[in-house]
Image (spheres, rainbow, N blue to C red):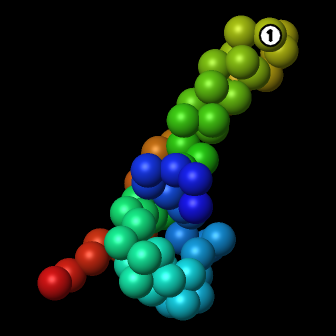
Amino acid sequence: MGCDCSIVCDDGSLYWASIQRADDGAHPVIRVNHGTSEEPGMVTLTQYVNNYIDGLDAEYIPHGCSFRLVG
């Protein structure tokens, strides 16, 4: 694959075969929840709106991950 590890978003690797192929090739994968992966950008956007758009207040509401892995 040309890299030491792949970082993927759960909606981009939703089908199990993508992860299985990486596992079969002993290629490590870090799978990140879609909403969680966008949180840093939402924090930055909130700061930008509050700093540069007069008369508009933005509030960041943390999303967090809506599920947990068991097992």
Rendering quarter of residue 39: top right
Residue 65 visible? The answer is no
Q: Picture coordinates of residue 1 (x, y %)?
A: 58, 61
Label 1, secondary structure: give it.
helix
Q: Picture coordinates of residue 28 (x, y %)?
A: 37, 63
Name the outermost residue toward the left: 71
Rendering quarter of residue 18: bottom right
Camera-side residue: 33 or 28?
A: 28
Left or right of residue 25, residue 12 in this image: right
Q: Is residue 15 above or below residue 51?
A: below
Q: Residue at image x 71%, y 9%?
A: 51
Q: Residues within 10 Å of mark 1 (few under 14, many from 20)?
A: few
Q: Quadrant of the C terminus?
A: bottom left
Left or right of residue 3, residue 29 in this image: left
Left or right of residue 29, residue 6 in this image: right
Residue 53 visible? The answer is yes
Q: Residue at image x 41%, y 66%?
A: 27
Left or right of residue 32, residue 35 in this image: right
Q: Residue at image x 80%, y 10%?
A: 52
Q: Is residue 19 above or below residue 29?
A: below
Camera-side residue: 30 or 43?
A: 30
Q: Is residue 9 above or below residue 53?
A: below
Q: Picture coordinates of residue 48 (x, y %)?
A: 72, 18
Q: Residue at image x 50%, y 83%?
A: 21
Q: Picture coordinates of residue 59 (x, y %)?
A: 60, 32
According to the picture, the residue beneath numbered tag 1 turns out to be 52
User: What is the tally of numbered marks visible in this picture?
Assistant: 1
Residue type of the residue flagged with mark 1:
Tyr
Camera-side residue: 26 or 29?
A: 26
